Each structure stands twice: as structure tokens, then as C-alpha cells.
Amino acid sequence: MNEKKKITRKTVWKVFFIVYALISICFTTLFIDGLLSRDYSDISQFETLTDGWDVTINDRAWQDVSLDDFRFDPVNKGDTITMTRIFPADTDCIGHALVLQIRQSAVTVYLDGEPIHTYGWDRIDRRKTVGSGYLPVDLPDNYAGKTLTLELTAAEDKAFSRFDPIRIYEWKNIYRAILTENRVPLFLGCFLTIFGLVACCITVFAMFFSGKFSRILCVSLFSICIGLWTLCYYNVLLIFSMPLYTICLLEYLTLYLAPIPLVIYMREDVLALNRPVMYAVYQILLALQIFATTLFLGLHAVDLVHCAATLKYMQVLILCNLLYFIIVEFMNLRVSRQLVHRLFLIGMLALSGCVGYDLLFYYFDRYRGISISSTKGIASVGLVVFIFLLLVSFYINLTQKMMQETERNFLIKSAYTDELTQIHNRRYCMEYMNGIKDMENPRYTVFCFDLNNLKTTNDTYGHAQGDILIRSAAQVIVDAFEPHGIVARMGGDEFIAIAETDDSEKISAIIGEFRNNIQRKNEEIPNLNLSIAFGYASCSPKEYNIEKIYQIADDRMYENKQATKKAIAT
């Protein structure tokens, strides 16, 4: 009854701390969110330049178009676009900046025919990637009523099929507005990156001691990649004044590398199916993922084919991996109804749904110029859910393995441990002696012990007192001999010690300590009357056979026992 109460209390405390931690995280997150968004209404004031644009794409021209509704065929590499409109004459134009969102294009900004900003032309000339994202352009204080002209040249095929909103902000508010609008990706990206880095450092150190942590290393590497990808995808890294092409390169790099640790993580689940065909498919997918990542990044590094052009192929490969892993987890659920597989399947389905939504959004936005929703980039949310469930499933799996290993170690220890004295038993001693047979030029001494007066103690005082006598004998032998080798109980009142030395002086010192231990034990426990007969024999150049040495020691112990009996009788 008391044990049940203790278990119930422990459970209650665990639940309390979990709930407390979750509430603390929620309140802390809401507090930080409040600090970021407290004066958002003030810093997010901007003017949108949507209507009244004259647009020319190569040889085709459109007059007075609205960017919200204007759609065109995806532009290809080398296509030129010119956009022109007049700034409102009544605009307050002190300390403002134009914020463009470019997509794989070089751009020059003109004001009444005078260039005020250029980006990306030198990179196109060198066949380098240009990148995509926000591009702030400083406006002079007298731009009101002047003509704004944007000249763009696409750096990649099918770069875009619509124009993103063009806004005018106050310079001092641009980066804070970007952070506030993308604060959820900011939280998620920072959390995943920091968590991944910390877990990676700890796991790399832990793997020196055990290979069990290889899967958590995969999770941490995956988390780092996804965290950095989230920060790049939402242009959060722009606040560090990083060039767009650097942010874009980091985005592609992390997206292409992220599937590899995830595929490696899945190896154990595939092997658990015990189906050669499924494992063969897994090996093909892993090899294909590594090959494609290496090839695409290599082509990008030498500027033959940029990642923007190979992205669609990587997206298809990622979807194939996700679908394969979903099938693997469904098959694992049919074989085993373990909670680990259920959690992983839920995480994989959530991740697949979010990634599928983002790919659909990306496809319609880039190739059709259609925004299917105002919400984009929910893959990061799905990834956080997936990684959380991944960690939970890993923790459950690791806990189960640790329990199994603990049980296994307990069984092994039980097989080699004497139950009464908790020292080694006869089986352990025999295996130890067999190990000595395989040694070259061993140096050892075998001691045999026999407890005197055990039968008399059992008959006179009972077996409980006899057990005390046996444990006391084991203790004095262990204290003297175990620092120099092993001690074991051979059965009943017989013990053995094998010291890893044949030095006569050292042996004499050990025996002296052993006799002193017997004396101290008799003084500690009144009426114990502990007496132990012993004999020993050391190996020599003429005799290395452990069994013969053991027999000599046992014979000498018997002689010592007989001499002790005669001395008592007289």
C-alpha cells in the first residue's frame, strides 16, 4: 500500500513539473511576443506602391496595371523587365526607403532617370547566383512627384510570374517591422538552431562512450539545418546585413543537406521490418539523396547550374523520401503497436502535410503567379512538431533500451554472482581461469580457503548465524585479496582468490593483511569465532597450468585445516 502511495506521489509530481514547465514556456513566449509586437502598429506604417505601373517584359508592354492582379508567363534567364510609375506628389518623404522583394533578378532603381541603387549585375556577369528576398533602397528626401523606374533582369529560368508588393517604409523601422512580421519563424528558427547546436555538441561527446546516441545526433543535425533554413526563408537573417545571395545560398545548402540525417535516422525503423526489399529501397534512396545533394551543390559551387534550377528535383526527391517513410511507419505499426511508431507516424504525416502545402504554394506562386493563401512557410511549424515527436519517440525508445540493458546486465550479474555474499561465484572463477590458460607467461598465485566451524555454528546457533559467518569470511578475503585480483565463493564454506602476482614478499604482505582482517572482524562481532584455513601456490617456470596450481593450493589448504583441528584438539 505504501509503495502504491509513493508511486502515485511521484507521478503527481512529474505531471506537476511538466505542466509547470509548459505553462512557463507559454507565458515566456507570450511575454517576448508582446515586447516585439507592442508598438507594431507604429513601426509597421508603410505606403504600398501597387497601382499605376507601366510594365515592359522584353517586347511586350502593359499600361496602368495593378501589381496585385498582374500575372504573366514565368520569365526566363536573361529576360528584361522595366517598371515605371510616378511617386505621389503629396508624400512625406523624409528618411524613407523603398523595400523591394526580388526573386533571382538583378535590379537597378532609377529616380527621374538617375540611378540611385543597383544590385546583382556584377554577379550575373560572373554567372553567380543572385538570390531572393527583401532589398531596402535608400530614397532621397526629394523623391515626391518624381518618376520611379525599376529595371530587372532574370538570373534563372522561370524565376517568377508576378510582382511582389513594393512598399515605402521609414528607414528606422524596416528591420524591426520585418522581425515583428516574422516573429514566429524567428522563434522557431532560433529554437531549432540553438537546440540542434547544443544537442550536437553534447551528443558528439557522448558518442565517445556509447553509439546509442547516433540517432539523437541525426536529430540535432536535422534541427540545425531546418532552423537555419527557416531563418533564411523568412529573411530574418537580413537584420545582420547579410547579402541576399549569401542568405539564399545558406537556404539552399541547409534545405539540400537536411534530408540526409533524417534518412540515416530511419535506418533502424527500416531494419525492424526485416524485409530485404524495403531495405534495398532504403539504400537506393539514401544513395540517391547523397548523390543528388553532392551533385547539385557541386554544380552550384562551380556555377554551372545553380540550386534555383535544381530545386524542383530536390523537392521531388524529398517528397519521395517522406512517402517512403510513411509507408515504413505504417508497416511497423502492423508488426508492432508500439507508441514510438505511432508518434513517429503522426510527426511524419504532419511534416508531409506541411511540406506538401508549401510545395503547392511555391509551385502556384512561382509558375502560375497565383497565391493560394496568405499563409506560407508552414513547413517550419510542421518541422517543429515533427522534431518534438522525434525527440519524444527517441526518448521512449532510448528508455526502453536502457531498461532492457539494465535487465540484461542484472541477469548477467546474477549468473556470475553468489547470492549470499554478492561476490563472484564458481562459474565466474572457472571462466577467469580459462582466460589465464590463454595468457602468455602469466604471473599469478592461487589461494584456497575453507571456513572452519561452519557446521558447528549452524547446528548450535542456526543457519542465520552461519550466514553471518560466511558473509564475514567473504568480507575479510575480499578486503585483502580483491585489490590484487579476484575473489569467488566456490560453494558452501569454500572460497578462492587469484592474485596477479607471484612475488613472495607481496604475497606475505597480503597474507598478513588477511590475518589482521580476521582478527578485526572477530573484535567487531562478538562471539563470531571466525577461523579460515587456507593454502596457496604460485605459478613457476616449470608449472603454468592453472588447474594444477589450483589443486596444489587446495591440497595445502586441506593440510592447514587438518593442522588447525589437531591444534584445537590438543
Image (cartoon, rainbow, N blue to C red):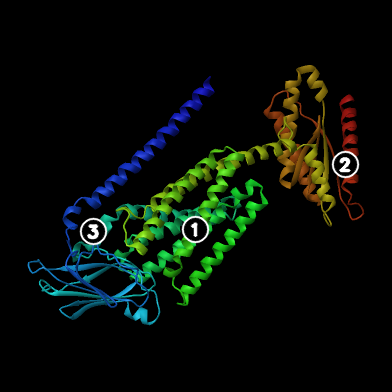
Q: Nearer the viewer, mark 3 or mark 1?
A: 1
Mark 2 packing: few (<14 Cα in 10 Å), some, or many (20+)? many
Q: Position of residue 361 (x, y in %)?
A: 37, 56
Label 2: element kind: helix
Rendered location of residue 193, percent (x, y): 41, 56
Label ID, residue 201? none
Foreground mark, 3 or 2, reads 3
Q: Residues within 10 Å of mark 1 (few under 14, many from 20)?
A: many
Is disc 3 placed on a helix, strand or loop?
Answer: helix
Q: In this rendering, is residue 16 above or below 53?
A: above
Number of marks drawn = 3
Q: Amino acid at mark 3?
A: Ala
- The three-letter amino acid code for the residue at tag 2 is Ala
Q: CA distance from mark 3 to mark 2?
A: 87 Å
Q: Which of the two discs, 3 and 2, labels the residue nearer the N terminus?
A: 3
Count neighbours of disc 3 (C-alpha within 10 A) and say few if under 14, some if 14 to 19, many if 20 or more. many
| Mark-to-mark CA distance, 3 and 1 | 33 Å
Three-letter code, disc 1: Ile
Please tell me whether residue 447 is drawn above or below residue 151 in the rendered image. above
CB within 8 Å, label 2 to label 1: no
Q: Which residue is mark 1?
A: 318
Q: Which residue is mark 2?
A: 553
Farthest-out residue, left: 90
Secondary structure beneath dot 1 equals: helix
Check residue 177 in the rendering and tell me which mark sits there, or answer none. 3
On the rendered structure, is 321 left or right of 137?
right
